[in-house]
Amino acid sequence: MRKDIIEIRWHGRGGQGAITAAKIVANAAFVSGYKGVVMAPTFGTERRGAPVMTSLKIAKTKIYDLSPITTPDMVVVLDHLLLEEADITNGLKQDGLMILNTPKPLNSYNFNGMKLAVADVTSLATEAGLKKGIVNTGIIGSFSKASELLDMDVLATAIGEEFKGKNSGKNIEAARLAYNSTLIGDR
Amino acid sequence: MHIIESGNVAAAMGVKLARTQVVAAYPITPQTPLTEKLSEFVDSGEMEAQYIPVESEHSALSVCIAASSTGSRTFTATSANGLLYMHEQIHWAAGARLPIVMCVVNRGVGAPWTVWNDHQDSISQRDTGWIQLYVCDHQQIIDTVIKAFYLAEFVSIPVMVCYDGYLLSHTYMPFDIPDPAQVDKFLPPFTPEYMLDPARPKNLNTVTLPDTRTDIHGNTAPGYMEIRHNLHSDLRSTLTVVEEIDQKFQAVFNRGGNPYVEKYKCNDAEFIAVCLGSLSYQLRDVIDALREEGIKVGVLGLRLYRPFPHHAVIEALSGTKGVIVFEKALSYGNQGALFGDIKSALYNADRRPKIHNYILGLGGREIKTQDLLDALRNSCTDKEKMNNTPKWVGLKL
């Protein structure tokens, strides 16, 4: 209803850290001047490995509507195999953006005019020294590059604050590597 | 300092800042992260309190009753069937005049099982003699928990702070953590009027005869009916106390103000939507959209449900053309409980508006903004006839 709210839907698997990723972005958005930030996980019972979603709404002023996102401006996908398991593009706006962690090249996808950004976050995160399969911080780098919404340095600080000493350097490095490697397609 | 966290964490931080001394709780969805956070605070020494794990909600409140009777600042939290399992002790805590604070993380009641949000759990406890407060966002959760201890201890009546399960409990948003020194300034340590003390033994809440009696000192001791009358009249006097407390809080923290209702675009409104909890915030965007269509409508969120703030309700609603009550609970076989309360308050008003009742969101049924828009527009434009039968929103029959 409000036109000034940026809606970002995060798709991951239970245990993959999509909620943490969205929370880090929420913190970075808040310190970047977005006073309205609402992050809502899918309500209910979560199972490890099963597809999960998290809604993140961002606006310059307080957001009062807590209802789930139905028409996202962006979707962030932590695992490309989810494309076959869940309706990832459901409701995505006409000029919407998908940010996808995938080992496949950009031109192997075709989403009818939707803007797509890809990076092999899984490999880049391992390169940064993280345990295999940790992708929730790396994808934030791709998000920064493709969305141009939040500055990579602000996001790096937010990642550091979330992990406080526990591998924060490696997580930030994963995001920076992904930032530099993200390829963005034409519509 | 602002942080972005869940509503459950906001509640736990409020409990910690209030220097709560005893916590007893049994985990239940969607309250669980609140009790987990409190046990973490106690375990790490961040919070100087006793966390007493129990095997059920009935025991949780029993422990709180005992702890509060010895003069400790006491907290518990629950949801849905957990709250109902406490029911006997909920009456007891109010009758015994113990200033316990409890967060009710609102969830629908089984059967059939649901873990999702509605208000049937706390609404079904409205006649127990507790004060019931409803909040709309995380700032209100943390602030209201702190104010609730002040209120409970000031009037010796327990308080429920009710917030929507998942919608608030599991959603993250920014809120300001009140400065601990300022909280201490606002909320002094608990000094009970009566307490169990081995040095001065006494009986509390023993069998009370139907009539008054002369006690061993020759004084007339109240009977059951006098004691219950006093609970009611003290609850009614709470209506003035709660305003003083809110003003005191506002003087320290520069937030709050009206403890009864929260109004949005009500001043010139011909129609006013009324509801409890976060739904009143969701309705704000709907109000804006209908105003663009030329419908003069506003929304009133009720913050204090028991005692019922008749004066604030009449002041806001009498003189309007129509009142539309949206409810996530039902007095089965009759109508929405809040609808009945609003109607009864307006009976004595000089100008009685038409009044309409919508039931929605039971068991977490998604409340679509478009559905709210359609329902409210229909009520304001007389498409939906106003009568005593609740209409259902989002029902798929």
Image (cartoon, coloured by chain):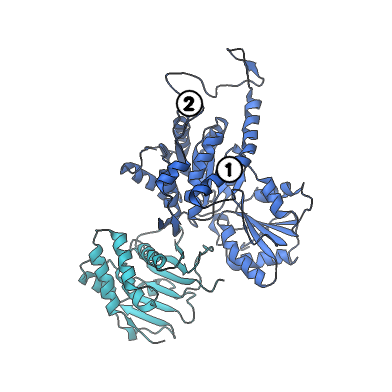
Chain colours: A cyan, B blue
**Residue where numbered disc 1 is placed:** B244
| Residue furthest right as drawn | B350
- Toward which corner of the image does residue B215 lie, by quadrant? top right
Q: How far from the left and from the top, in percent, is residue B197?
A: 44, 22
Badge 2: how crowded within 10 Å, few (<14), some, or many (20+)?
Answer: some
Task: Identify which residue is drawn at 34% across, 42% down.
Answer: B42
Q: Quadrant of the N terminus of chain A?
A: bottom right
Q: Secondary structure at mark 1?
A: helix
Q: How far from the left and from the top, in percent, is residue B90?
A: 54, 36
Is B377 drawn above or below residue B391 in the view shown?
below
Task: Identify which residue is drawn at 33% across, 44% down.
Answer: B46
Question: Which of these two is toward me, A50 or B182?
Answer: B182
Badge 1: how crowded within 10 Å, few (<14), some, or many (20+)?
Answer: some
> How many tags in the picture?
2
Q: Secondary structure at mark 2?
A: loop
Mark 1 and mark 2 in contact? Answer it, CB < 8 Å: no
**Residue where numbered disc 2 is placed:** B195
Tag 1, which chain?
A: B
